[in-house]
Image (cartoon, rainbow, N blue to C red):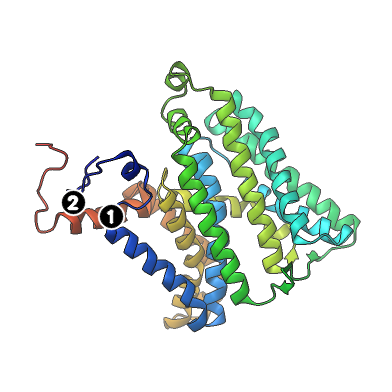
Amino acid sequence: MPHASGYFRTSYNDDLALLDTRTQKVSCALFLLCLVALPFFAKPLLIDIANQVFLAAVGALALMLLTGFAGLVSLGHAGLLAAGAFTTGILFRELAAPIWVTLPASACTGAILGFVFGLPSLRLRGLYLAVSTLGLHFIVVYVGGEYETRRGFSTGITLDPPQLFGFALADGRAWYFLLLAIAVAATLFSLNLLRSKTGRAWRALRANETVAEALGVHVSSYKLIAFVISSTMTSVAGCLFAYYHSFVSIEAFSLFLSIQYVAMVLIGGMGSVLGALLGAFFVTLLPYVVEWTTAVLPLPASITGLVFAINQAVFGIVMVLFLLFEPQGLVGLWRRVQNYFLLWPFRQTPLSGSK
């Protein structure tokens, strides 16, 4: 398949490559090198923001697989994060379980919940499916709240830093490298999964279930697979969230958190792994940008005291603006910029033989 730049793939190996050209390979290598070098020069606040972006990226990739590629709507993402976090907190508090136990246990919890709450997708679609997944959020929140109350953890569950190979992950820089590795692994897993038979089946489901079934796609199986894989990844992110913050409280997993992850998928760009990463970066960074702006600008004290409300208002406005004027999200903007430089100065050159 030719690129807009005139680059042609000449073999199946070229077609399966994640990075096509030398420029892409060099750019990716330089970007990863910058990420590795960042914690040695950045301040603790910047490292903390980067860690939050990596955590959000794992959850955003999970939701992108489910919604962006399989076309299955879910509003229970915060519930799945809470399930992974509370599984970790309960095992740590009750059994003093290490991360080697809590992490797979959280993944199993997510897989079970994904299978159970994926069953309604076999008969429900659209808004009805979204409402059924919303029930997952309220059930997990109720169970977590009951555990906190009955065990006397009224202010939440505290966790000690996890031990990896004899080292305690108590430093933001150590967490940075771990979360970066996990985010890269989740990205590679998603990219390779989407190039497999499963990924092609999900794309067919999103386009048209009836046609997909007529072409031999087992619709029910691939829907459940989508829910199980997405829920597993999300619960793993919840486990890491609990350890990173050393604290688990039901207040951290509000319905607004689910909306934020939906926003990551929409703002980043539906049906794109890069869109999930860009959306996670944008939505995570947005509150800090708003707070910095309100602190720098000479605003009245009555306004600067409403930072939380301003954050939510800006968040809603940004979502509406993207839906109205840029439905392809940040990845659509990136592709247009990329095509501009690929075709410059011949911007009117027809692509793929079009006239």
Read off the residue under disc 1: 21
Q: Quadrant of the N terminus?
A: top left
Q: Which residue is drawn at 57% across and 80% down?
A: 44
Spatial CA distance of label 2 from label 1 is: 11 Å
Q: Earlier in the sequence, mark 2 or mark 1?
A: 2
Number of marks in the image?
2
What type is the residue that disc 1 sits on?
Thr
Left or right of 290, for residue 353: left
Check if mark 2's residue and mark 1's residue have beta carbons within 8 Å: yes
Query: Is residue 130 among the parts visible in the rendering?
Result: no
Q: Is residue 295 left or right of residue 95?
A: left
Q: In this view, does 25 lie to the left or right of 337?
A: right
Residue neighbourhood size for the residue with mark 1, other residues' Cα within 10 Å, grouped as few (<14), some (14–19), many (≥20): some
Q: Please tell me which residue is depicted at 45% across the width and 80% down the height of the picture.
A: 299
Name which residue type carries label 2: Ser
The residue shown at (49%, 22%) is 217
Under circle 2, the secondary element is loop
**Coordinates of residue 200 in the picture (x, y in percent):** 44, 33
